[in-house]
Image (cartoon, rainbow, N blue to C red):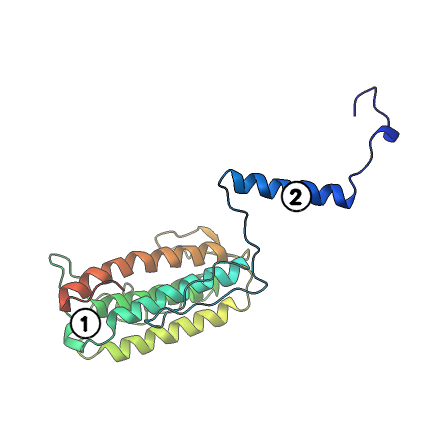
Amino acid sequence: MTSTETPSETSPKNASETASETSADASNAHASGTPAAPDAPDTPVALTLPDGRQVPLTTGAEGPMLESWLAFHRATLALKCAGLDDAQTRLASAEPSALTLLGLVQHLAEVERNWYQRVLGGAADLPPVFDEATGYRIDPERGLDDALAVWRREIARGQEVCADHALDDLARVPDDQNMGGLTVSLRWIHLHMIEEYARHNGHADIVRERIDGTAGV
């Protein structure tokens, strides 16, 4: 308001004026080639791909969206192993890399156990599931079914821990780990886990394709 304006000289817009301007804005946006933003659905829409994986949520709250991305990547890892026998999942098919699908499943079971139980849950003394902390070493007595069962168990236990925490809750990484002493939130852990799975699913893409030619998952 300038020094020459008074409250009586400025009146609020009535409903018809507002509606006219809204309509004009929409017309201008259409004329300029800019589509009007669609209304968000009242509830997130869950879509399932032909291979059975659910598409991650595209709208809604942050927590469920992060969890849906994690679920998508977990399902992708399982799909990469589907239809193979134990010998195939032990095959390091992308030489000179020693990575195997069985080793990746074991490794990600350890990663799930570490971030959600040791770090977020505070169980710093929880031992590794397998013989060494990374999970990559292949035990001739353990096959894919056993490794997948352990992996799914660690996921379920981690989800139980997450149920008691909000995204902004903080946890401290144990001193004996690579990022020891770092304080992280559950949000950060979810994002890190999505990155971890995305990276290793890329590895699994190559390993699986070189085993039997399966690609595109």
Q: Quadrant of residue 71?
A: bottom left
Per the image, label 2 sits on a secondary structure element best described as: helix
Nearer to the camera, 120 or 88: 88
User: Residue 13, relative to residue 125: is it above or below?
Assistant: above
Q: Quadrant of residue 43?
A: bottom right
User: Residue 41, relative to residue 20: is it above or below?
Assistant: below
Q: Quadrant of residue 8?
A: top right
Per the image, label 1 sits on a secondary structure element best described as: helix
Mark 2 or mark 1, whichever is nearer to me: 2
Instruction: Please tell me which residue is depicted at 30% across the width and 67% down the height of the picture.
Output: 77
Q: How many marks?
A: 2
Q: Mark on residue 208?
A: none
Task: Give the spatial CA distance, label 2 vs label 1.
Answer: 60 Å
Nearer to the camera, 99 or 184: 99
Q: Mark on residue 89?
A: 1
Q: Is residue 73 left or right of residue 61?
A: left
Nearer to the camera, 5 or 97: 5
Where is residue 3? Give x, y as percent: 82, 19
User: Residue 28, relative to residue 107: is it above or below?
Assistant: above
For the residue carrying disc 1, how many other residues have a C-alpha within 10 Å: few (<14), some (14-19), or many (20+)?
A: many
**Three-letter code, disc 1:** Thr
Q: Is residue 163 left or right of residue 87?
A: right
Q: Earlier in the sequence, mark 2 or mark 1?
A: 2
Where is residue 94? Give x, y as percent: 14, 60
Residue 92 appears in the figure: no
Instruction: Please tell me which residue is depicted at 55% across the width and 59% down the height of the picture.
Output: 61
- Quadrant where the image shows the C terminus: bottom left
**Three-letter code, disc 2:** Thr
- Quadrant where the image shows the N terminus: top right
Instruction: Please tell me which residue is depicted at 56% across the width and 57% down the height of the picture.
Output: 40
Where is residue 90? Give x, y as percent: 16, 71
Q: Mark on residue 22?
A: 2
